[in-house]
Amino acid sequence: MQKVKSRKNLFQRGKSFLEKYERHLSSLALLLGFIIDSLTLRRIDLFIENAVIIGYLAVAAFCIVILNLNTVGRENFFRRMLEKIHPLILIVMQFAFGGLFSVFLVFYSRSASLATSWPFLLILFIHLIGNEVLKKQYTRFNLQVSIYFIALFSYCIFLLPVLIGKMGTGVFVLSGLASIILISFFLFLLRFVVSYNRRVLFPLIAGVFLSINFLYFANAIPPIPLSLKEVGVYHSISKTPEGEYVLQHEKERFIERFKSSRSIHVRQGDPLYIFSSIFAPTKIKTAVFHVWQKQDSNGEWISEEKTELPIVGGRDEGFRTYSLKRSLSPGLWRVNIETARGQLIGRVKFEIFAVEALPQLSIKVR
């Protein structure tokens, strides 16, 4: 009898502690989780990374079921037990959603150029923060399922290219169909244990589906699973018999680290090289493009040259490739690294100054 009372007191103390410090503990867990993900997540095609995501999805699905379980006609003991664990299950669900969007934000931001992909990254960030702020709203079934569908769709977008070994519009459409099939199967299973209004839920899911498709075709979704590891402007590039690239470049002045563009000095007739290293999962073979653009007197960017460069996935440091251009006139230039359908992987910006003699160059090996 005394042991039973002791256990009850321990349970009550634990419950009181969670209720009192829930916001602080959740905020701390969110911050630590994001930092750990940023430092530990390596490659999008590794088994362990995908196992973690699938684990989060499974936990979130389980919590949605428990939180919305139809207890009508159930025994009083069962209903009371669900009421007791309800706050804990809600915290676990928030932890799973926080983990999912933390992982997505890390992976998608690695593949993103903020110039074009900020809307989708903002959506992921809002869901990551909203997971912390909108605690009371998380008790609503429609919101839970809508967020779960966003997580499913976001995962399918980079999972299918990894599995298939291809990228492009067709693979994205297939990702959308896969996410619809998965959420439909989940809702079909829920019908047996949860009561919900299809007329409200289905339009919400359709809205999420159409919104993500709009962002994709507006090139606002990062070209995941590609990610830019390195990009730079060089005066010469040569390849050694061992397969290493020897790059000659100007030393970067300290003040230029805080500027949007670098100063590059070029002699008349000399070429400039853009070297890029792009990570892709092992199975993927695709092409990227270096698009050389110059800013005109009206501030508009005019494309002057576009070079197609095939890449093969699998190398941790990224597939190395480069393009070159001759007859570069002084002024502000940039080179966009894009996919075949125009998604921006990265960009390097520089200002060219005509000189008769080059400054002292440094050597870098990649």
Image (cartoon, rainbow, N blue to C red):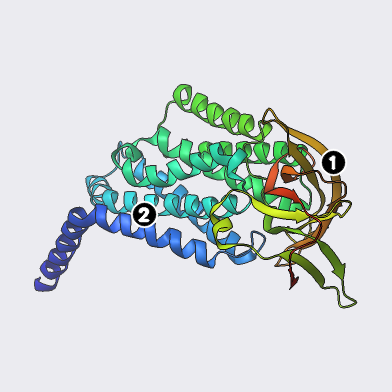
Q: Residue at x 75, y 39 (%)?
A: 294
Q: Residue at x 78, y 67 (%)?
A: 248
Q: Are marks 1 and 2 in contact (CB under 8 Å)?
A: no
Residue 180 picture location, percent across and down: 61, 36
Earlier residue among tags 1 and 2? 2
For mark 1, does the 10 Å Cα neighbourhood hold few (<14), some (14 to 19), or many (20 or more) residues?
Answer: some
Give the residue pinned by disc 1: 305
The tag on residue 92 is: 2
Above or below: residue 3 compared with residue 285: below
Q: Residue at x 53, y 43 (%)?
A: 121
Q: Secondary structure at mark 2?
A: helix
The tag on residue 354 is: none
Single out the mark in the foreground, 1 or 2.
1
Residue 51 picture location, percent across and down: 57, 61
Residue type highlighted by circle 1: Glu
Q: Residue furthest bottom?
A: 242
